[in-house]
Amino acid sequence: MLIKVKAHPLSKEDKVIKKDKDSFDVFVEAKPERNMANKRIIELLSDYFNLPQSKVKMIKGFKDCNKIFDIKYDV
């Protein structure tokens, strides 16, 4: 499943907000440098979907606030 994520680094708290069926806002306290915010987003999404981090993969938007992730469910 592909989802769109709008990243909000340097936020006051870490949280995931579902905006639409496949669209999320993810707020992270981490800085947008040295891949720290991206790693934290992956951690939060894996917790949100109750999956291991290896099942959450960033496809697009490594240096952008608009990102696309592939969430792999085992069916």
Image (spheres, rainbow, N blue to C red):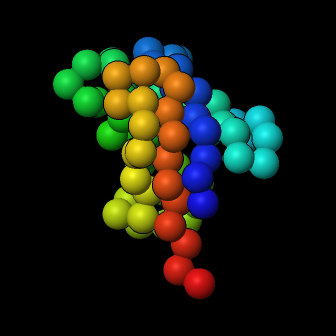
Is residue 40 rendered to the left or right of residue 7? left
Residue at 40% x, 53% y: name it: 57
Res. 36 in view: yes
Q: Residue furthest bottom?
A: 75
Q: Is residue 47 above or below residue 27?
A: below
Q: Residue furthest left?
A: 34
Picture coordinates of residue 16 (x, y %)? Answer: 62, 38
Res. 13 in view: no
Picture coordinates of residue 62 (x, y %)? Answer: 35, 30
Picture coordinates of residue 31 (x, y %)? Answer: 33, 18
Q: Residue furthest right?
A: 20
**Number of numbered discs visible in the structure rendering:** 0
Residue at 49% x, 47% y: name it: 69
- Toward the viewer: 39 or 58? 58
Residue at 42% x, 30% y: name it: 61
Q: Write down the quadrant of residue 56 in the picture.
A: bottom left
Picture coordinates of residue 30 (x, y %)? Answer: 36, 24
Quadrant occupied by the C terminus? bottom right
Residue at 40% x, 45% y: name it: 58
- Toward the viewer: 47 or 72? 72
Quadrant occupied by the N terminus? bottom right
Q: Is residue 18 above or below residue 12?
A: below
Q: Residue furthest front?
A: 60
Is residue 20 rendered to the left or right of residue 11? right
